[in-house]
Every structure is written in C-alpha cells, then in structure tokens.
Image (tube, rainbow, N blue to C red):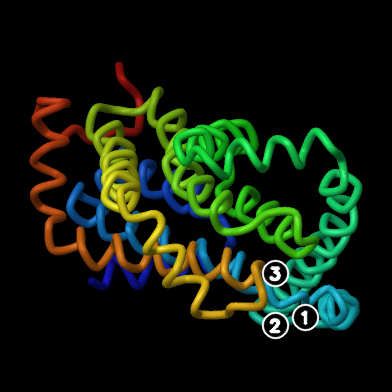
C-alpha cells in the first residue's frame, strides 16, 4: 500500500507514469526494489497519471500566465534549492495549462472536418476500434497523459462523447506499457519481469472493464452530465482507481504469473570492473 502511495505521489508531481515505471524498472535492475514492491509502485503510477487529465479538464489555461510568471520570477531570484524546485513545478504546471489551451484551440478545425466526424461515428459504434485507436496513439506518443489530454481537448470542442473516449482510454492504458518494455530490453531478466507486471496489470484492467463499457459510461456521465471533458477525466480516474483496488490484493499472484512467463531467479545488475 505504501508503494501505491509513492507511485501515485511521484507520478502526480512529474506528470508521467511512463517515467515512473522506467525508474521502477531501473531500480529493479539494480536490486533496489523487488517485484512485489515494484507492482505496488506501478499501480500507484496509474492513479497518479490521472491527475493531469483532471487538471486540464477544468480549463485552467486562463490562469496559466500566473503560474508561468510567478514560477519564472521565483526561479530567477530564489537561492534555496527547495524554493527553486517548487518554482519549477509551478512553471511546469503553467506551461501544461497553456499548452492544453493552445491544443484545444488547434483541435477545433479537426473537430469540424467531415472526415473526423465520419471517423467518430465509425469508432463510437465499435469499441474494439476505439481500443485499437488508443493503442496506436499512445504507442506513438509514448504517453497516456498526452492521449487523454487530446481526448479532453476534443471533448471540450464537443467533437467526441464517452462512447468514443472510454474505449480509447482502455487502449492507451495498455499502450503506455511500451515505454517500460523498451527500457527493460537492455536490462536483466528481473527488470523485464517488472515491465511485464505493468503490461499484465493494465491489460487485465482493460479486459475487466471492456464487457461493461455501456454501464460504466452511464455511471461516468452521471458524475457531470453537461461537461464531456470532465466525464473523460473522471472515467480515466475511476477506471485506474477501481482496477488498483481490485488487483492490489492480488499483487503476489501477478508476480507468480510473471515468474511463470519469464522463469529464472532474480538478477541484480552489478557495477564496477569486470576484470
């Protein structure tokens, strides 16, 4: 449970579950963390990454200049490292909010295009296509936060609804594992197991929710009936929190399954001269 809190906290700050899972893979590779500990942090990272979508769904681009200005000024004049670090965080959030505002504006021509409307109609009627779209988008951009941010931006323009957005969210949650898998390719077997835990956890979560897409969409729509952007953010959060609550007690079994798929004793990357 502490691992979940750590993973959620770190990811909420750095705004990237991929970065958190890559760090976890590195720690496992170095023997600083075992697979069971890694599983908890990875689950927490999935919760922490939902903070990004929640923030951008509130249309905070209007106050972005305040964050950017205050962060930049403090960063220039402050001498204490802790204060400078906090200023950097504020500056980063300001840039994030402004970027989402710019992206929302840029999405309007796309949302009005006839080809995109036809695409939305086709994908909204076929959840598997939506899931594959989420897989493809996130595998390319290497960030589930970026994909959900795009969904929020499109929802703000009124171009999409939850029938399209939620299957895409399921797909992006699976595809975000690609980064950790790539990071583990040059690492030892135990690090590869950590990346596989991430993939297994996210895939099982998508499989659990896929048959219940329609009732879940009705539940999420009830959280904010008039704001699709908020519905997208809430769906992302509720999905990841629910999957973590369901699978956290089964972490040891996930590790056992991974050990069956990739058999072998735990390895630790040794540093120093070989000869």
Q: Is residue 162 left or right of residue 153?
A: left
Q: Secondary structure at mark 2?
A: helix
Residue placed under numbered mark 1 in the picture = 79
Q: Which labelled disc corresponds to residue 156?
A: none
Characterize the local packing of mark 3: few (<14), some (14-19) or many (20 or more) Cα atoms within 10 angstroms. many
Q: Is residue 58 left or right of residue 259?
A: right
Q: CA distance from mark 3 to mark 2?
A: 25 Å
Q: CA distance from mark 1 to mark 3?
A: 31 Å
Residue 223: % across, % down: 51, 80
Residue 138: % across, % down: 57, 39
Q: Nearer the viewer, residue 26 or 5?
A: 5
Residue 194: % across, % down: 28, 41
Residue 274: % across, % down: 31, 20
Counting labels gives 3
Q: Residue at x 78, y 69 (%)?
A: 97
Q: Nearer the viewer, residue 267 or 216?
A: 216
Residue placed under numbered mark 2 in the picture = 83
Is residue 76 in view from this perspective?
Answer: no
Residue placed under numbered mark 3 in the picture = 56
Q: Residue at x 42, y 65 (%)?
A: 47
Q: CA distance from mark 1 to mark 2?
A: 8 Å
Seen as rendered, the residue at the extreme top is 275
Q: Secondary structure at mark 1?
A: loop
Q: Nearer the viewer, residue 84 or 66?
A: 66
Q: Earlier in the sequence, mark 1 or mark 3?
A: 3
Q: Is residue 7 left or right of residue 243?
A: right
Is residue 132 in view from this perspective?
Answer: yes
Characterize the local packing of mark 1: few (<14), some (14-19) or many (20 or more) Cα atoms within 10 angstroms. few
Q: Contact, CB < 8 Å: mark 1 with mark 2? A: yes
């Amino acid at each position: 449970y502490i691992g979940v809190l750590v993973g959620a906290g770190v990811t909420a700050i750095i705004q990237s579950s991929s970065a958190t899972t890559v760090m976890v893979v590195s720690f496992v590779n170095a023997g600083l963390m075992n697979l069971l500990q890694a599983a908890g942090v990875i689950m927490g990272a999935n919760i922490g990454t939902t903070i990004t979508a929640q923030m951008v769904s509130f249309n905070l681009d209007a106050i972005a200049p305040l964050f950017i200005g205050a962060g930049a000024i403090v960063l220039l004049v402050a001498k204490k490292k802790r204060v400078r670090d906090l200023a950097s965080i504020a500056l980063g959030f300001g840039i994030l909010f402004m970027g989402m505002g710019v992206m929302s504006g840029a999405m309007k021509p796309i949302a009005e295009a006839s080809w995109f409307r036809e695409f939305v109609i086709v994908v909204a009627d076929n959840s598997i296509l939506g899931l594959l779209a989420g897989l493809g988008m996130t595998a390319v951009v290497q960030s589930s936060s970026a994909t959900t941010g795009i969904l929020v931006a499109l929802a703000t323009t009124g171009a999409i609804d939850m029938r399209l957005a939620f299957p895409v969210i399921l797909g992006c949650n699976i595809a975000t594992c690609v980064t950790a898998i790539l990071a583990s390719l040059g690492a030892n077997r135990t690090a590869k197991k950590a990346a596989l835990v991430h993939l297994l956890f996210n895939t099982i979560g998508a499989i659990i929710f896929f048959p219940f897409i329609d009732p879940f969409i009705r539940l999420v729509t009830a959280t904010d009936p008039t704001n699709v952007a908020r519905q997208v953010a809430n769906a992302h959060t509720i999905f990841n929190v629910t999957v973590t609550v369901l699978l956290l007690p089964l972490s040891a079994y996930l590790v056992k399954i991974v050990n069956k798929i990739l058999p072998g004793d735990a390895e630790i990357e040794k540093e120093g001269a070989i000869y």
